Structures are given as structure tokens and as C-alpha cells.
Image: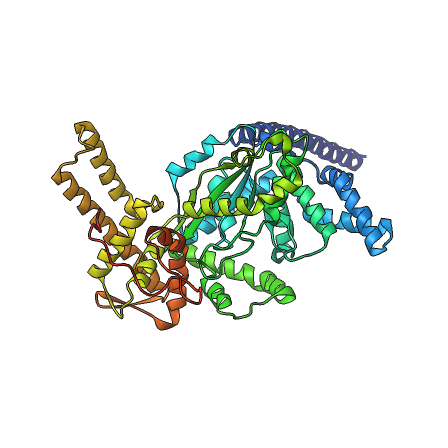
Amino acid sequence: MALHWQVLSYAAVAIIAILVYEAIRAAVKARLKRRFRRDLQRFLSTRDLYSQSFKFTNKDVVRQLLVTDPEVERKVLEYAEREGEDLATVRDKADGYIDEIVPEFNILSYFKVGYTVARAFIHSLYDPVVDRQRRRLLDTLPPDASPVYVMNHRSNVDFVLLSYVLAGKVSISYAVGEWARVWPLERLFKSFGSYFVRRGHKEDLYHKVLERYVQLLSKHGVVQAVFPEGGLTRDGRLLPPKLGLVTWLSRVELEPDFDRKLVFVPVGVNYDWVIEDKNLVKEAQGVRRNTGIWKKAYVVLVGPFVSLGLLVVNATRFLLGRLKLHGYASLSFGEPLVLRDWLEAKGVAPDRLDQETLGAHMETLGDALMERIGAAVPATPVPFVAATILLHPQERYPFRQLVQQTGTTVATLREHGVPLVVGEAFRKFRRDLAGLAEEEERLKTKDRPSELDDVTRGLVHQEETEALVRYGTEILVRNKILRRDGTDYIVRPEAEARLRYYANSLGHHLDKAWPIRMGPDGSGMAVGAPTPREETLA
């Protein structure tokens, strides 16, 4: 009997313990959920994500919106009739495209996992800097804007850099190529709100589904980003625009229920080192790259290990105090283009806008966007030094001579409003120049600066140019593009194409400034330079 009561008492204690545990667990869970909701509300309000609430729409709802879309249904019927296929089969095909394209945005994945990884990745490689003055252009966007960031494409890091820079305010939906349609990248990118695009796919049914999806995003104010060039630049120069996505996005203006303003926001990006520079230069020279299954195999099997290894190596160097970054990853913004206003300036009345009229202006629009993107592309130390070397071809480049020649390039581009976006290493010179400007304003001598002010300003620019050349040549030497011989620098013959690749990132700026002829083979800037001007420090 005693044993029986002992067993019952143990069972009662166990039951009470379980009940207490469940009560505590429920209370903690409820408290965490309340806290999570508060944090989420605060997070959304501080990042203007309420205007992008469509991103949180269930994927099944978005799929249903596309399946029942009149234009998609019309294309399904047209495709079935033309190809002689069963209507149900074609609908299943369209539904497969929808499932492939539409992502499942996850706010925690984007702003916690994605942002954390992006920050660690960017800061382990570069000193990221943003043109703060031009960033204020984003504050001029209309409150009812449906923004589309249009960006030059120099590296696969581009979308990581832009997302990282803007993560404090918005999340961005990107078009991602088929290279990312492998596990686990596919699931990861879809949780970031990215949608997949089949490059070079000619089928009109697929194009219609994709077109209606990007228009659906714009109708609901979701921030998007596209690369008008359609792919990475292989020689460093800006490419002519490919108008597919830009045209589809623009057609949202034809929608009777579109009550926003489609705004294209130009973004210019440049680097002191592009991770893929060797491969890109080889492709520009005609070396065939891996495609199809081999590329996917590389992405899955090799890519993650390379990236992880790079992070581990850099983390180790950081802990040992020996981390050397690969220069600046610089980003600048251009003047936003409100499509409706731009069309009205071209003489197109909103009430007379139709698909034919809009299509007639697409080529001009593409050129206008590329011009604004080009104007926003910042200059950084390595492109400056690379351009100077190619503009003054010689066997050896003594440091002092290189400083003087680079000073000419810097002064010329400054006169043409090209943004020089640099960071901490150049902050002293920015403070000194700002102090001189304030002193001039205080003395009311801005229109007639004294000779002393000119001399002081010249010395500051001289010191800044010396620092810029040291910074740029150090990275070029480290990346085995230049070779140091005492105080002289020599271009490695096998790396001349890579040097030209970096110089070409400023080619469109320099062409407007001097102008400079392009090489006869169209590969980059011609060897041969204009006569250096005297006011190198102006």
C-alpha cells in the first residue's frame, strides 16, 4: 500500500511539474509574441515598409491574381490555339511559370539574416562608402512613388551593396538569373523577395507572366531594382540598355487603376577591386565561360566554400589585426526620373498615352536612364590611377610624376561634376577644404579669394592626390596589376587588360571631359593622351 501511495505521489508531482512547465511556456510564448509584434510594428514604421505591404501578401493570393489576370488568360488562349495544345496543359504551364517567379518574402530573412550576412560580407572585403550629398535626392521622391532603382552592373556584389546601403529604409525586389535556381540559394533568394528571370527565354507566354508580375509589384508600390544593361560589363564600360524589364515596368502607366508615379532612380556603383575581374576580362577576350549544368554545379559545390573560405580568412586577419581591405565599394545616386513627367516633357499627354506611343519612346528612355546612371558612377582611387596610366603611356611611372598626372585627371573630372566618393582615409582633406570654404564665406571673399587661400587649397589638393595615388597603387600592386620598383611603378604586361577594365569605368566621364577616343577595336580607351593642363591642382 505504501508503495502504491508513493507511486501516486510521484505521478502527481510529475503532472504538477508538467502543468507548471506548460503554464510558464505559454506565458513566455505569449510575452515573446507580444514583444515580437511591438518590435515588428516599430521596425515597419521606421523603415517605411507599410507602403510595401503587398510584399507580405501570401504567395497563393499573388498566384491567384496572376492566374485570373485578363492579359495572362488571353495569352494562354492564344498560345493554346497557336501551338495546338490542350488548354488545361497550357494553364498548368503558366501556373508553373508563376510558381517559379513569385517569391515568398520573409521579413526576418531579409532584415536579419540577409542584412547581417551582407554587412559581414561587404565589410570583410571593402570600405563601403555612399555619396551622402547625392543620397539626399532620395528624399525628393514623390510620396506616391513606385520606385525602380536602375543600376550599372559591374559585379555580382552590386545587389548586395545596394540592399545593404538601403536596408535601413526599404527592402528591394531584384530580378535574379537562373544561376541562383539551385538549392539552397533558390529558397534563400525567394525569402529575400527576389524573383527569377530566365535569360534569353523566347516564349511569349513566359514573358507575359513575368511582365504582369513586375507590373503587379509596381501597382502596389513595391521597390524594385533592375540592371538596364542586362548583364555584367566584361570590359568595364557601360553597356547599351536592354529595354525588356524597363518597357514592361513602363507599361504600368497604361493601367487605368495605376494611381502612383513610376520613378526610375539612377544608381552608380564602382569598386577599387571587382571580385570577378579576371573572369570578366577573359570573357571579354573571348574565353568561353561555364554555362548550364556546369555553372550550376560550380555555384552549388564550389561557390559557397570559396565565399566561406574568404570570410574565414578575412575574419582571421581581422582578429590578428592584419586585415587589408580591397579598397572602396562606392555608390552614388543620380537625378530621379518620374516617367509621367518625362513623357509630358516630350509632348505626350497622359490622356493620350497608349502602348504604341509609349513604345516609340522606349529607346530614348533607355538612353536617358543610362546617361543618368553614367553621371552617377563615382570615381575611386584605383580607376583614377588606372585611367591616368593609360592616358600617359610610358614604361615606368615615377611616383611624383604619377601624382601630377593623376591631379590633372582629378581636377578635370571635378570640373565636370563627377562624384569622387572616398571614405575615412580622405576625411582629413574634406575637413580642410570645408574649413577653407567656411573661412571664405565668413570673410565674404568667396568671389575674390586671396592668394593665400589659393595656395592653401592647392596644398590640400596636392596632399589629397598623393594619398589617392598611394591608396590606388597599393591595391593595384597587391592585385598584381602593377609592379613596384623602388619609387617607380611598372604595368605587368599580362595584367594590362585588367588595368584597362578599371580605367574604362571612368571612360564615359573622361570622354565628355576631354574628349578621349576609344581604341580602334572598341576595347577601351586609346593609348595616347591629351596634353596635360597646367592647373593640375585647381
Above or below, 86 against 44 in this view is: below
Residue at x 17%, y 31% (from the top left corner): 445
Give residue 512's position: percent from left, percent from top: 37, 51
Regarding residue 104, the answer to whether it shows in the image is: no
- Which image quadrant for residue 135? top left
Q: Which residue extends farthest front?
A: 347
Give residue 321's position: percent from left, percent from top: 34, 54
Regarding residue 435, the answer to whether it shows in the image is: yes
Which quadrant, please, contains the N terminus? top right
Counting labels gives 0
Residue at x 56%, y 34% (from the top left corner): 340
Frontmost residue, 415 versus 399: 415
Give residue 200's position: percent from left, percent from top: 64, 58
Above or below, 145 against 73 in this view is: above
As drawn, is 103 to the left or to the right of 42? right
As drawn, is 288 to the left or to the right of 438? right
Residue at x 53%, y 45% (from the top left corner): 364
- Which image quadrant for residue 436? top left
Frontmost residue, 450 versus 272: 450
Frontmost residue, 306 versus 414: 414
Figure colour scheme: rainbow
As drawn, is 111 to the left or to the right of 125? right
As drawn, is 136 to the left or to the right of 20? left
